[in-house]
Image (cartoon, rainbow, N blue to C red):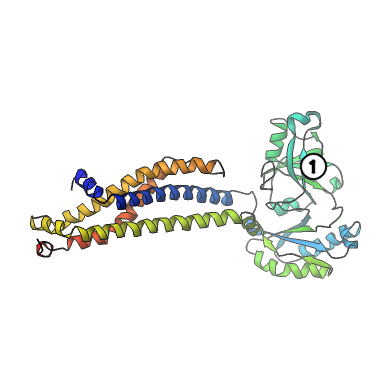
Amino acid sequence: MSVFLIIKSLLRRKVVTALLLLQLAVTLGLVVNSLLLASAAKELVDQPTGLSLEQILTVWVKPTSKTLRLQPALTDLISRQLTAVRQIPGVEAADFVNQIPLRQGGSNWNIFERDRQDESNVDSVPYYYTSEQIFQVLGVQLITGRLLTQQDWGIDNILLTEKLAKQLFAEQNPIGKVTNNGTVVGVVSDFYSQRYASHPFYGQIVFGPLHRAEQGYQLIVRVAQGQSEAVRKQLTDVIRNAEPQMDIGTVLRMDENRDDVFRSEIGLATLLSVLSGLMLLVAMISAYSHAHFHALQMQKEVGIKRALGASKARVLLDVLSESWLTTAIGAGFGILVCYGLNISLAKVISIPAVPVWLPLLTMLLLLLCVTLATWYPARIATRISPATATKTL
């Protein structure tokens, strides 16, 4: 059947055809943008963190006794807890920290080079009060300078992540530079610090005691490969045995912390993936209904074609050709819809621009779905015999 005859056939059913074209256009536009949002969310969740997520355990703890929440009892308490935790089989290192990487915390400062405040100021940088085993726990590597040691305890010597050092000092040697937070003695490899800091990979490490623990603190533990579950089962009891007067939170692996931080993005990616599948399913159902109804309407026409010598394959191709043309026209409008929707969404949320290949790929997917949906009605049309179709003529 020629394109002209197919279009003429479609124009005989203007309302139904218009509704089908509208649905196909909206489906393509929504699927493309849903896939973009789902892909962006997945990339955010799967981005490298610089941490061995499955080998690091974290647990929030808080002394129930007011005396234990203050110095000097607090330092003694933390020392007893860490000594006990480090003796658990499978534990490679353990330390305390005021806040853990990945999680949003309240311990953020600005930082700048003292002689260049206006040029170098960085507004929000997480800082970590901790001690010597933190580097082994996090698995960070020394880039330049030296690591902090026990001799730096309580002294204004700080250690920066690599990205932060480059932001502050560009290509200059950061070692010995004096900031408002202390003197830089070393730079370590980047790790994901906080999502809403000035940059997720900015961080500064300070060795010193926690002055108080009214909000609690974190114990962070690195375990041997494959030992996370075994250590997790023992960790709460070991901490409580070291000091019974403790509130102890849930022990989490670092990948579980990550999933919790990005829960909304993970949920969005899942929801949009399901939504895309449902929209394609609805498009298939509509295409099936349209093709089936049309096949019943054109019984006489098909019968005449068969009587004039048209093969079943030719009849099948005629029916499918109408579906293909309808899909192509609807998808053409859908490309305009997807770009328009993308521009509108970009004004209110963060969404990537539509790459040229994605609407075309989605168009092929839509064409495949419609072909599968209309195959059975098209097969029904080929089974109509000339005698059945023409007996009422």
Q: Residue at x 47, y 56 (%)?
A: 275
356 displayed left or right of 383: right
- Among the 4 quarters of the image, the one containing residue 227: bottom right
Give coordinates of residue 297: x percent, y percent.
Answer: 21, 59
Q: Residues within 10 Å of mark 1 (few under 14, many from 20)?
A: many
Q: Quadrant of the C terminus?
A: bottom left
Q: Name the amino acid, label 1.
A: Ile
State the image coordinates of residue 100 (x, y, percent, origin top left). Answer: 72, 53
Total labels drawn: 1
Residue 149 shown left or right of residue 200 in the figure = right
Give the structural element (helix, strand or loop) at label 1: strand
Q: Determine the residue positioned at 79% across, 42% down.
A: 158
- The quarter holding residue 295 reads bottom left
In the figure, is residue 57 to the left or right of 365? right
Q: Which residue is mark 1?
A: 158
From where the camera sits, is residue 352 visible? no
Residue 282 shown left or right of residue 35 in the figure:
left
On the image, the x and y values in percent for residue 203 come to: 72, 44
